[in-house]
Image (cartoon, helix red, strand yellow):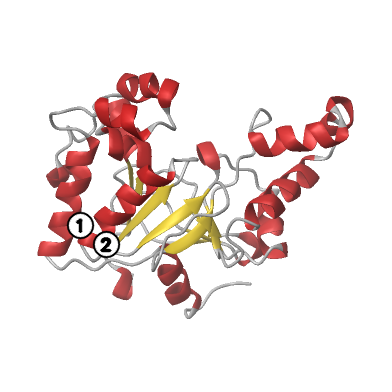
């Protein structure tokens, strides 16, 4: 993998988080001197020196397609070709971060019909494949000159499986391979201890005060994220935004 061997990439799926909750996770990165990639679900997201990507929501009951249904009527919207639906969602989401070069789809949704649309809208990379704790990961060239940057670890995966027991030693950061870490602002803010804990908080998802009251006092996702950031900073591990990895790989031989 050359200079990307064992690189750690911190990423955030913004997930319509409250500004105070989003600021909280951004502050954690800033305090540890780490740049991250924020995949944006809505407009007005200020990430400072960090990278912005897109987090399109292709769900039929999602806000973007509900807006289209409202404009066209349910019957007319239901008859639209899938590619045109994806195009509408991508165009709408691109307005949130016009400079974005990459995307990660909400719910990690994927359809090969999206790849030509990435080229149409100037997107160069995708990060929607979750390959948890797989050693030796590296970027993968896909059709239409799109680069896939797979996810190595996700906080939601941990809440569902308990794969590491919140122990960063079991992330094996010393092994070769790209380590793309996927975090969610509400899970980190809540210090979620289980998927049930997180799901219960959705009743007050946009209320930072109630979320803080519900924060788990013991070891949870926030504890693990802090351990990870402190380990990366103290060991001076190589980190990069996904955009930086994308740029480096585009300087190498590939098919087009």
Q: Secondary structure at mark 2?
A: helix
Quadrant of image for the C terminus: bottom right
Name the residue beneath numbered marker 2. 30
User: Residue at horizontal 61%, vertical 64%?
Assistant: 98
Relative to 147, residue 221 above or below: above
Query: What is the crowding at mark 2: few (fewer than 14 residues within 10 Å), some, or many (at least 20)?
Result: some
Looking at the rendering, which quadrant does residue 192 occupy? Answer: top left
Residue 16 shows in this picture:
yes
View extreme (front): residue: 209
Q: Secondary structure at mark 1?
A: loop
Q: Along the horizontal axis of the image, is 37 left or right of 99? A: left
Mark nearest the camera among 2 and 1 is: 2
First along the sequence among labels 2 and 1: 2
User: Residue at horizontal 87%, vertical 35%?
Assistant: 72
Measured as percent of width and height from the top left, residue 236 is found at 15, 68
Q: Nearer the viewer, residue 204 or 113?
A: 204
Measured as percent of width and height from the top left, residue 148 is found at 50, 57
Quadrant of image for the N terminus: bottom left
Q: Along the horizontal axis of the image, is 85 left or right of 79? A: left
User: Residue at horizontal 12%, vertical 29%?
Assistant: 218
Q: Along the horizontal axis of the image, is 57 left or right of 65? A: left
Query: What is the crowding at mark 1: few (fewer than 14 residues within 10 Å), some, or many (at least 20)?
Result: few
What numbered label is drawn on residue 88?
A: none
Measured as percent of width and height from the top left, residue 121 is found at 69, 63
Name the residue beneath numbered marker 1. 175
Q: CA distance from mark 2 to mark 1?
A: 26 Å
Measured as percent of width and height from the top left, residue 129 is found at 47, 46
User: Residue at horizontal 27%, vertical 24%?
Assistant: 194
Relative to 202, residue 51 above or below: below
Residue 184 shows in this picture:
no
View extreme (left): residue: 234
């Amino acid at each position: 993998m050359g200079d990307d061997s064992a690189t750690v990439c911190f990423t955030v799926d913004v997930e319509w988080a409250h500004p105070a909750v989003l600021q909280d996770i951004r502050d954690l990165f800033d305090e540890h001197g780490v740049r991250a990639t924020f995949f944006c679900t809505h407009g007005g997201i200020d990430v400072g020196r960090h990278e912005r990507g897109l987090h399109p929501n292709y769900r039929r009951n999602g806000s973007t397609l509900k807006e289209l249904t409202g404009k066209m009527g349910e019957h007319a919207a239901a008859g639209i070709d899938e590619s045109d639906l994806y195009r509408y969602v991508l165009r709408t989401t691109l307005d949130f971060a016009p400079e974005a070069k990459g995307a990660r789809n909400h719910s990690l949704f994927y359809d090969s019909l999206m790849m030509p649309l990435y080229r149409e809208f100037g997107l160069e990379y995708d990060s929607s494949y979750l390959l948890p704790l797989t050693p030796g990961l590296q970027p993968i060239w896909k059709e239409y000159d799109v680069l896939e940057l797979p996810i190595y670890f996700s906080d939601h995966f941990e809440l569902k499986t308990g794969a590491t027991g919140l122990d960063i030693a079991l992330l094996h950061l010393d092994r070769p391979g790209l380590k793309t870490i996927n975090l969610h602002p509400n899970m980190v803010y809540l210090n979620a201890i289980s998927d049930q804990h997180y799901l219960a908080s959705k009743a007050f998802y946009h209320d930072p005060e109630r979320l803080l009251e519900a924060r788990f006092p013991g070891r949870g996702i926030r504890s693990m994220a802090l351990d990870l950031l402190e380990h990366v900073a103290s060991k001076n591990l190589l980190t990069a935004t996904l955009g930086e990895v994308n740029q480096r790989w585009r300087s190498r031989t590939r098919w087009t």
